[in-house]
Amino acid sequence: MFKRATNHQEPAVQITVDGLPVTARRGDTVSAAILTAGCVEPYRYTAVNGTPRAPYCMMGVCFDCLVTIDGIGNRQGCLIPVSDGMVITRQNGKREIES
Amino acid sequence: MSFPESLHAAYDVIVIGAGPAGLAAAATTAEAGLRTLLVDENSAPGGQIYRAITTSPLKNSSILGKDYEAGNDLVHTFEKSGADRLAGCTVWSLDRERVVGLSCGGEARLIKAERVIIATGAMERPFPIPGWTLPGVMTIGAGQTLLKSSGLIPSGRLALAGQGPLLWLYAAQILRAGGHIAAIFDTTPLANYISAALHLPGFIFSPYWTKGLGLIREVKRAVKIVTGVTRLEAQGKNKLQTLVWEAGSRTGSIDLDVLMLHQGVVPHVNLAMAAGIKHEWDAIQLCFRPVLDESGNSSIKGIMIAGDGAGIGGAESAAERGRLAAIDTVANLRPDALAQIPSRDNVRNRLAQTMRGRAFLDHLYRPSKVFRIPQDASTIVCRCEEITAGEIRASIAIGATGPNQLKAYRRTGMGPCQGRLCSLTVTELMADERGKSPEEIGYYRLRSPVKPISLAELASIPQDETAIKAVVRG
Ligand SMILES: Cc1cc2nc3c(=O)[nH]c(=O)nc-3n(C[C@H](O)[C@@H](O)[C@H](O)COP(=O)(O)OP(=O)(O)OC[C@H]3O[C@@H](n4cnc5c(N)ncnc54)[C@H](O)[C@@H]3O)c2cc1C
Ligand code: FES
């Protein structure tokens, strides 16, 4: 949904989103990296009705950017900067209890 | 990021929010020798207007404009002041005893201060139109955040809809960054031009006049503008595909990849309300705001509010209100240091200058009722619990009297955003439906934690011996 307006000189940061390798730039938030990568759509499905959503406010108030980061769920991707090796998983609907 | 070793167990002053208000407040109290801590959940200082001022890839370019660069001075002054800063740290609670609950890198702490200055700023007013939850629809502020912090512009077909200074500023920034805007749908009610005209004299002598007109001209040269828009509907199956619009008797539709919405900003009241601070309805700015004295003292002793969280005044007045709160704090905690910081009179005068022209903007950009109170039954009001305007009206019909009862009927305001994105809509919709004023209907009763926190984080709070003994039996 987004592209870089400048010849970004910031160093690259490697992360994975649902197992796919994504190259972000230092200073990107997790949400910015996912919106630029374009390979993962939709961003998430809601837990209530399973509808597709993507970040709405990018400033920490709407919670439509929730993702699992390094195994911890429901993190606000728009507030958390990427770091090398970060493992991001999308949240697809309600959580299931694993037996 | 986690809590640094150097963090003190208590502070003279804790300032929450590192926008212009918080930066100016913290720098001033630290210069007076008060032990000061500035906390912000973002990793870089600057708040909304100066977001990513120290890290933006667009630094020193002409894209973001001169007003943005002004943030550099505030950050430099803060850095020299000797105040401590916790970045990437969320405040999840604040109580009457001025104990601040902090969460940082998966750990939590409770830290007490003699004074707390809340400078958590503003957020964009909800813009509930049919389809506003579709991927591809976001706020103009969200677009601008992506531009400032990562140098990103939308790819594909973009339209902006709504009203207010931020719309024109972002449009100009996108054009300067080489982006393209297919159309702008201006929702400013035409009657506003008449009510605003009364306040024109104050505005003409403010810096907004030439700046604002210049921006609007710059954008109008390059973009198709539809004015007097009265209805917007975003359509698409799993993401935005089409925007359908009406402007009086004119109608049309446009295929889009990204639609950005904005109809002004309102104080971000969650933390202050959860602390129990008294708020009142502002009938001009159409939002709740805290009841404060001239310095920013709230209804709770020792807790102050500065910046746009105290009522919308813009970035320059936010910094001055931060300084005023700091001067009051120094006068109370260390009066002998008053000579080292700016005088109250000077700051008051500068504040009055920065507020010139505000009344004009407030009246011109007062959003229309049709975009505040959804008319279509199917429009989602509570994004988290996916509750529509029709469902809320049905609950009112069978007896829900206010936002707190509505929670029991529909769970509105009980999802992760804790009512940030639906509370104003719910209050105004209920007021409209029941023939009452928003003041009478009131707001959700908010409680800490104002942001979700895990049990593991709560358990990480260091306990002293008395706290442990209090719950251990035998
Ligand atoms: C998205 C957006 C973009 C804007 N862009 C512009 C612009 O380009 N130009 C302009 O003139 N005005 C802009 N504004 C208007 C804005 O309100 C400014 O007037 C100014 O930024 C207000 O300054 P402030 O210090 O009051 O608060 P802000 O600058 O909003 O700073 C508040 C800070 O508090 C932090 N915070 C909030 N809650 C918590 C919490 N619980 N824990 C920890 N930290 C917290 C936030 O992360 C933020 O950094 C914008 C507003 C918004 C909402
Ligand atoms: S995008 Fe709204 S909270 Fe992250």
Image (tube, rainbow, N blue to C red):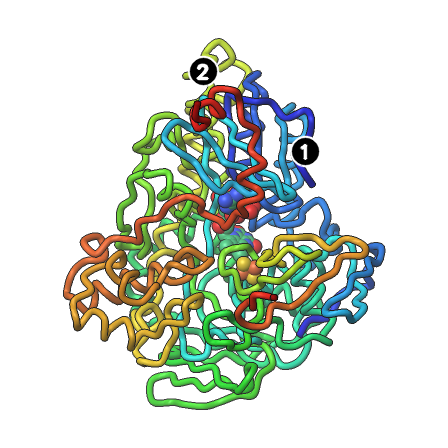
Q: Residue under mark 1: which chain is it in?
A: B
Which mark is nearer the camera, 1 or 2? Answer: 2
Relative to residue B155, is residue B242 depicted above or below? below
Q: Quadrant of residue A60?
A: bottom right
- Quadrant for ligand 2 reads bottom right
Residue B91's spot in the image, x, y percent?
Answer: 51, 40
Report the amino acid beneath label 2: Leu
**Disc 2, SS:** helix
Q: Could you tell which of marks 1 and 2 lies nearer the N-terminus?
A: 1
Residue at 41% across / 16% down in the picture? B332
How many marks do you count on the picture? 2
**Disc 1, SS:** helix
Camera-side residue of B302 and B179: B302
Residue at 58% across / 44% down in the picture? B456
Q: For residue B71, say whether it is visible.
A: no
Left or right side of B381 for B396: left
Residue at 41% across / 49% down in the picture? B267
Residue B95's spot in the image, x, y percent?
Answer: 39, 33
**Residue wearing tag 2:** B333
**Residue wearing tag 1:** B76
Report the amino acid beneath label 1: His
Residue A87's spot in the image, x, y percent?
Answer: 74, 60
Farthest residue toward the front?
B474
Relative to residue B219, is residue B269 depicted above or below? above
Q: For residue B266, say whether it is visible.
A: yes
Say few, some or many: other residues with alpha carbon within 10 Å of mark 2 (under 14 / 14 to 19 / 20 or more).
some
